[in-house]
Amino acid sequence: MARHAKPDPSRLDGQCALVTGGDGGIGSEVSRALAQAGAAVAVNYRTNADAAQALVDEIRATGARALAVRADVTREDDVLAMVRRVEDELGPLDVLINNAGVQRDAAFHEMSLEDWNTVIAVNLTGQFLCAREATRAFLRHGVRSLVSRSAGKIVFVSSVHDVIPWAGHANYAAAKGGLAMLMKTLAQELAAHRIRVNAVSPGAIRTPINRDAWETPEAEGRLLELIPYGRIGEPTDVGRAVTWLVSDAADYVVGATLYVDGGMTLYPSFIGNG
């Protein structure tokens, strides 16, 4: 009698994934990686419809299913409508990648209330709203055993600044620190429902948002002093990590933060100072 091969646990075939802020930088590479693993991918955007649609067209050209969906993650009605549309067009939601984020940097004594509120609203409250709606979707459909061992997976895309203080970025660091405890609390609460919640915290990644930190040889040299591994990360590094984390290959990983940072959180300034 022929033996049937076991499904590859790293694959996401038959699953539906939503990537917030999926139209650029880390989000676009996460969207590509999820699609390559077999998922249907909803690419969320707020203002750049052309970039989102171009990415969707690129993904569709590979034979994968994809959808561009506009929503402001700080607006509850937008988030509810986004999840409904994703499920209507791509099927039951299995994966949420909470990636949308912004920076509004300033010295603390010069930081405006508007800059504080904007960063907290997108980077923390927006992630709460999207995680809540995804959780409701996961609870509605439960474990779909033909596609995954879990009812749903949520990954918060955080930052090394959930543990590393960052002068001049108090709003951003506070949001990421809050996100770390939100993730752990949800992981604890939702595990009994077979919903896995984790986080990925990138370090220095070569994206347009931090171009000033790596664009010149001098800037790159200063940045590399903070990275023991000796190179700046690429968005694909994060995309591969996220895709593994939401696959059944990581089914026993619950409430963890995966630092994709080349060792930045290892306090490299202490090298040689023992």
Image (tube, grey):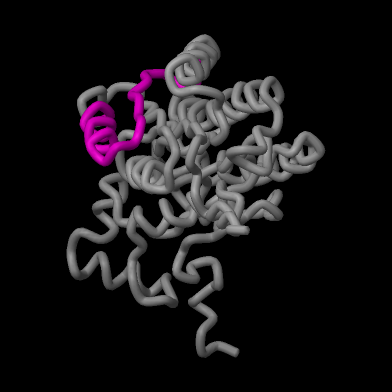
Q: Quadrant of residue 142?
A: top right
Q: Give the range drawn in magenta.
A: 52-75
Whether residue 163 is visible to the viewer of this picture, yes or no, is no
The quadrant holding residue 111 is top left
Left/right of residue 15 with respect to residue 274 in the rendered view: left
Q: Residue at x 30, y 39 (%)?
A: 24
* Residue 212 in picture, x, y percent from top left: 25, 54
Instruction: Single out the residue that lies furthest toward the left.
Output: 216
User: Measured from the top left, where is residue 222 in percent x and y?
Assistant: 31, 70
Asked if residue 57 lies in the magenta stretch, the reply is yes
Which quadrant holds residue 64? top left
Of residues 140 and 238, the one nearer the viewer is 140
Residue at the image point whose x is 37% and y is 35% from the top: 22
Direction from residue 65 to residue 270 in the image, left or right:
right
Residue that appears at 65% across and 33% down: 144
Residue visible at 61% across and 46% down in the picture: 177
In this picture, is 159 found above or below 153?
below
